[in-house]
Amino acid sequence: AFLAALWPASLQAKAPCGPATPAPSPLPAASAVHGSDAVASADAKSELEIGQPLYQMGDDIYTIDRSGTLFYYFQANKDGTAKVKKEIRYSRNLWNDCAQLKVRIPFVTRYPVVGNTYSGLSNIELGYAYGVKSKPFDHTLEFRVTVPTAVNNVDSLDTQLKGFYTVKWKQPGWALSYTNEYDQTIIRPPGASYNSYYEGWLQVPDYILVPEVPGLKLSAVYNYRVLFDSGGIWKGALGGTLFGSINNLALSVTDTWGLGDHGLWRYKFEGNATARF
């Protein structure tokens, strides 16, 4: 039934989303917004797309007609370089509230150890997501393709296919979510880098800080990556995220620090604001 919903007989009939009766929650093996941008694995990119609970698994921004997001991150790498990414995101429902079309337009600034700072448009991403929510359990399947639109050498010009599966278990007063991501270069022109890795993002417990403000939540986050393009090296980061929502607006900030010699980065700050309309 889930696969059939991915390809409805008529795209013109806007049907309601979600199961008729809530399915029981499966037992989690392990358990966003995010999610990763298209750069070489050695550059330890970001966007742990859940991560950002706003974009993939947000409690209040998930099943909407349209949403726009402004995303920002600063990333200090272990080799002394740094990167700033500013991104405009747009999401729109298709034939029902579960199916969504997603577009991401990023702008990147790089700070080398030696030489001048350089900036430009990075690789645009186009995606399709299908998510189902129920009282105890949410899950989302998403695919994205990264189009080689980068200028001024801010990112590699390889074409990537990305797959995501995000799950969220919800209980009174807390929640646990986990995003699986796999990124793979499918077209690699001369001079472009090759990317192949698995990424996981764990977020828990979505603790409500103030009972009178249930939209304000705090979580610890654990992000890691297994780099198949570098002999299966593991890299990780640990931190926390603060998420707040009111009416049609949601905000989040996330801080993470790389773990030891195999840290994804030295330090990273992420922030985004999402509005639905």
Image (cartoon, rainbow, N blue to C red):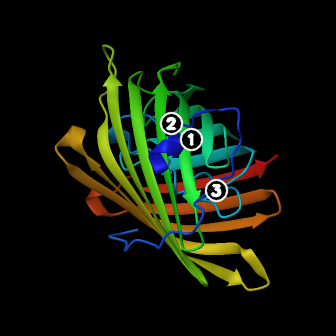
Q: Earlier in the sequence, mark 3 or mark 1?
A: 3
Q: What is the spatial separation of the Cα atoms under label 2 and label 3, in whole angstroms?
A: 28 Å
Amino acid at the residue labelled 3: Leu
Please say whether residue 52 is visible from this viewpoint.
Answer: no
Q: What is the spatial separation of the Cα atoms under label 3 and label 1, in whole angstroms?
A: 20 Å
Amino acid at the residue labelled 1: Val
Residue 39 image offset from top left, x and y in percent: 41, 34
Q: Residue at x 48, y 35 (%)?
A: 144
For mark 1, give the secondary structure. strand
Please report contact status of discs 2 and 1: CB closer than 8 Å, yes or no: yes
Q: What is the spatial separation of the Cα atoms under label 2 and label 1, in whole angstroms?
A: 8 Å
Relative placement, left or right, of 21 versus 233 is: right
For mark 3, give the secondary structure. loop
Please report contact status of discs 3 and 1: CB closer than 8 Å, yes or no: no
Q: Residue at x 31, y 34 (%)?
A: 195
In the depicted structure, whether residue 187 falls above or below residue 137 = above
**Which mark is in front, 2 or 1?**
1
- For label 3, the crowd category at 10 Å Cα-Cα, with few meaning under 14, some 14 to 19 and many 20 or more, is many
- For label 1, the crowd category at 10 Å Cα-Cα, with few meaning under 14, some 14 to 19 and many 20 or more, is some
Relative placement, left or right, of 51 versus 223 is: right
Residue 44 image offset from top left, x and y in percent: 38, 45
Q: Earlier in the sequence, mark 2 or mark 3?
A: 3
Mark 3, residue position: 54
Mark 1, residue position: 84
Task: Give 31 or 121, whichever is nearer the viewer.
Answer: 31
For mark 2, give the secondary structure. strand
Extreme residue in the left direction: 231
Amino acid at the residue labelled 2: Tyr
